Amino acid sequence: MSKTIIISNRLPLQISIEDNNLEVTPSVGGLATGLKSFHRDGDSIWIGWTGLTEEEIPESLAQDVKKRALEEACVSVNLTAEEIEGFYYGFSNRTIWPLFHYFMEYTEAELSFWEIYKKVNQKYANEVLKHYQEGDQIWVHDYQLLLVPNMIREKAPEAIIGFFNHIPFPSYEVFRTLPWREEVLEGVLGADLIGFHTYDYERHFLSSVSRILRLQVDFNEVTLPNRIVKVDSFPMGIDYEKFEQAALNHFKNTSEEQSDLQNRLDHHLKTTPEAKLILSIDRLDYTKGIANRIRAFEYFLDRNPEYVEKVRLVMLAVPSRSNVPQYQRLKREIDELVGRINGKFSTVNWTPIWYFYRSMPFENLIDLYTSCDVALLTPIRDGMNLVAKEFIATRTYHTGVLILSEMAGASHEMNEAILINPNNFEQISSALKQALEMPKEEQIQRNKMLQKRLKRYSVEKWANDFIKALKNTKDNRNDSQSIKISTKVSSEILDTYKNAKRRILFLDYDGTLVNYTDKPENAKPDKELIELISKLNSGNKTDVVLISGRDKHTLGYWWAKTSVELISEHGVWIRKQNSEWELSENIKNDWMEAVRPVIENFVDRTPGTFIEDKNYSLAWHYRKADPELGEMRANELSSVLKELISNHGLSVLEGNKVLEIKSSDVSKGKAAGKKLVGEDYDFIFAIGDDWTDEYLFRELPEDAYTVKVGIKNTSAQYYVEDTKNVREILKLFADHT
Ligand code: ADP
Ligand code: G6P
């Protein structure tokens, strides 16, 4: 039976060694806490790091560590102290983490970190490959493993691979500053499905892919030569029932069964019944806005002295990534701030901030969630923020108020919370006042709505939706009905070719025989290509026709020394073997003067675009324009032109990053059709890569071999991935002229 292989940097369990014994604790952090229940309930293995370096594990305990992980269907990846330094504390948490959270001033571009990151990602990929069996789904998680999807793909091309990014994906303007931006994007694009928490992160990712890698992006799909990658947003939920049930059980506890923490909280509530508790929980991370939060609390007390002795901020910060200098500095800053504010406001009976710097068992988290009146969560940036959702799930009496930063992914689904800008003290201060004074009915009304949504979109549903969408990508790998030209298929075609008495090959030029270049004039045929085409054309059984949208001058110049037949401008001109150019029919071009200024206007408004003036057509190229702007202007120009040229016998062709206006009587299909009239070819072969070639594919007789370069939207019977494959097939033909 197929299984799911989950792979993340950290396993859901952390192992430590105390007096030669293994101690196991649950991992903290949204990824581990969220995915745990999906892993527990499903058929999956989880590959990751235990938290111990290789050096910390004595040989006598190495097997025990592995065994202990296996008991929870986890496979441990061994990492040395040096690897952890460069990969985890280094590239993951000193480069990607700050950059993706828009802390550019903290981002370090250190080559040695990157080298180790690559090495460790390969280590994870190798571990996955050891466990992978055909039919399994592989689900890679988070920013520590951005290169893993493609590393797996290289060794297992057919594998179904999903990737989920648990942190924000920054805007293109920020992402582009990363020195290794291409490699990172290519790494992630090894996946079939890429998931983000919000649509904004998805949008930013797609924009980087189209701008940096210049790949074709249509809505939420990226087209690679041989695959389509789907990108979507799946906001992660929580194990709602677990938190709700824990809260219900919590209220059933007798005072003897209660934790010390709960007793302390109860004591506080009894002694100052009118006082309120404000809760703050996060990993100690600069993205969480903890320092700002404390300052905003100070501001609130300054502004609202009537709340002195009436409110208390209960602040829980979990130690995190403490080898990274920014985290050490933050720790000192928070310690000082708490000290200063407690010093400033404390009275004999009251300290404004209770500060805990430690991880807490689940039961204590529930104590805090259920006992506090307000949760104040003010991250400056946060991929999701599960604490906000957990707080709401535990409010079984439906009271309590959530104040949440609009910079947290969770804010998109939690509109009924009081949403604030974490950089605006005044707003936080008035949100606190509003929360503390909010009537019970309003609290209940808001929370019921939040709870209904969180219950429905639980972590289980999140994971199932992702896996379902991932499995579906298998069916979408090729969205047309065309068949890939494998070795077997190409040898079948070759057999027919060899047995044929008269053959004709229609070959498109750009994107088929040569790759696209930034400027059309740079795509000159190379020596190998000229020799190949000449050889194909040399026997008397085969007619080769280069059929292109190019102007006759360029095409004629490039192929001057060969006798190959040329059709230019989609069929306007023909240069038969060893002949001069002839106009194929009487085509008008007097319309050009009226249309050119319209296109010129678009050139002026769209940097990087230009007009190619052909004899009987005008082409507007936008390959070098900003991809999004280019597409937008292409749509606009296309509709402007269609209106302008209606009833004039002209049409607008939408090619690969080019719009071309020409007579409707001209198309590659019509030109090829004319060529076949009265001929008795028994092998017809046509190959091309864009929309203009579709006219050719459609016009040819049914027994013709039609081949698309690329996989998207074609009526061709067959497809190949790239120009390299095109040449391979042509070489086979050339060997049997
Ligand atoms: P992040 O993923 O950035 O750490 P989230 O809010 O998404 O932030 O997830 C944090 C997770 O860690 C939550 O599931 C929360 O219950 C857990 N957690 C937070 N603080 C503590 C703590 N002091 N002890 C134990 N678990 C904690
Ligand atoms: C965030 C990240 C996780 C990470 C967690 C805890 O939630 O998205 O990938 O595991 O923080 O951080 P840590 O560095 O301790 O694994």
Image (cartoon, rainbow, N blue to C red):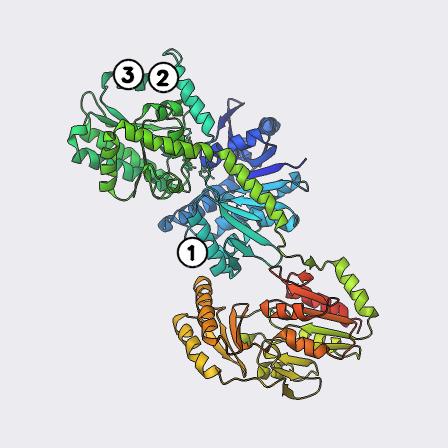
- Residue 172: give its label: 1
Place of residue 621 in the rendered image (x, y in percent of width and height, measured from the top left) = 49, 72
Please state, as top left, top right, bottom left or bottom right, where the N terminus lies in the image. Answer: top right
Q: Position of residue 663 (x, y in %)?
A: 55, 78
Q: Quadrant of residue 561?
A: bottom right
Q: Residue 570: x percent and y percent?
A: 60, 77
Residue 267's tag is 3
| Residue on which disc 2 sits | 260
Query: Which residue is nearer to you in this view: 421 or 341?
Result: 421
Residue type at tag 1 = Tyr
Residue 687 falls in image quadrant: bottom right
On screen, residue 716 versus residue 638, left or right, reads right
In the image, residue 410 sits, relative to residue 704, either above or below, namely above
Residue 726, image quadrant: bottom right
3D distance between C-alphas at marks 2 and 3: 10 Å
Q: Which is nearer the eye, 358 or 352?
A: 352
Q: Are marks 2 and 1 in contact (CB under 8 Å)?
A: no
Q: Are marks 3 and 1 in contact (CB under 8 Å)?
A: no
Sequence-wise first label, 3 or 1 = 1
Amino acid of disc 2: Asp
Residue at 63% x, 84% y is 584
